[in-house]
Image (cartoon, rainbow, N blue to C red):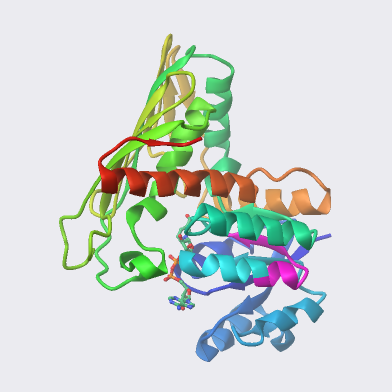
Amino acid sequence: DRLGVALVGLGYYSTDLIAPALQLTKNCYLAGIVTGTPSKAETWAKKYNIPEKNVYNYQNFDKIADNPDIDVVYVILPPSMHREYVIRAAKAGKHVWVEKPMAMTEKECQDMINACKQNKRSLAVGYRLQHEPNTQEYIKFLRDGKIGKIKMVSCSAGYNDNRTTHWKQKKEMGGGVMYDMGVYVLQGARLATGEEPISVTAQQYTTRPEIYKNGLDETTMAQLVFPSGARAAVQTSFGINMNFLHVTGEKGFLKMEPYSAYNGQTGEASGGVKIKHPYDVPRQQAMQMDDDADAIMNNKPLIAPGEEGLRDIRIVEAIYRAAKSGQSVKLT
Ligand code: NAD
């Protein structure tokens, strides 16, 4: 059996990655859409053979509660809208998937988790990397102690965004690079150490103040301290192309590059270890949705539940506070 998925927000990620991935999935399929643009509704319905009764707009969205074709609502909107649509989906009795960054604040994340719990629905964050074999292999390699105790992590993820008026450049919509590629470098630091940071320091800057206005971060650098004493330096940018994870342990190293791409992840580590499991785009997103649908259908734990999204947003908030104050911020 397969779960019916409705996508909310038909922008770049839905159009180019998630809808094509839903043509490859075995445990779920594209059953419905929610869009504010009637012309998109028409194009998508035709292209993906979606019946009119499974097409919603933002006004009649809550009526999805009465639609047995839809099991899961996948929220792929700008981050400032995630909280509202996740809660509305949960209240409509649907399981919910939400894109990263989960939301703007830890409080919003907690509200979303609570709403899903109260309605007995599951909540997964679209952390596609946690579902892909290269990432799973490097995590296992590190957890198995292959390079000993982790001492230092360096993780960078950025790209040169030439857009000038996108929501990623508007604070009120969830803009700022720390909310965007920033969550990937936090994932790199957390997955590599297997720990949660206890304090952070951070610096932010922009080279294009006419685009990244009022101090909105185009580039963020942060330093994380972990309970074991391990440290991480992470960098993320809308102006610099970079993508790697480098982990130094007492007995060796691990390096992944690219680290957070849609495919092509390649790793090497001490002892002549090579990590490379190739696959085509958008297989990664298909693996993610198949895992999450399987978890729902067979009552298994989710790989990246809402709590995992919250852990990163908590650190994101601390990093903004640290950058603003110039002081170390404790996470307790
Ligand atoms: P996008 O701007 O291309 O799409 C956003 C969609 O939301 C558009 O269709 C837009 O019409 C719609 N929308 C509805 N109300 C809106 C409003 N008030 N203002 C602006 N847009 C509104 O963005 P995207 O790149 O598709 O990103 C959407 C989400 O997916 C974000 O959370 C983003 O972080 C995430 N994303 C994740 C990945 C990944 O690799 N996991 C990659 C890209 C984007």
- Say whether residue 252 is magenta: no
Q: Nearer the viewer, residue 121 or 26?
A: 121
Q: Position of residue 35 (x, y in %)?
A: 56, 81
Q: Is 250 situated above or below 33?
A: above
- 200 left or right of 99? left
Q: Is 255 situated above or below 130?
A: above
Q: Is 67 situated above or below 90?
A: below
Q: Nearer the viewer, residue 34 or 112?
A: 112
Q: Nearer the viewer, residue 40 or 273?
A: 40
- 310 left or right of 241? right
- Residue at 58% x, 33% y: name it: 136
Q: Nearer the viewer, residue 11 or 320?
A: 320
How many marks do you count on the picture? 0
The quarter of the picture where residue 319 lies is top left
- Say whether residue 95 is magenta: yes
Q: From which residue to which does the magenta span run?
A: 88-98
Judge whether residue 95 can be spotted in this image.
yes
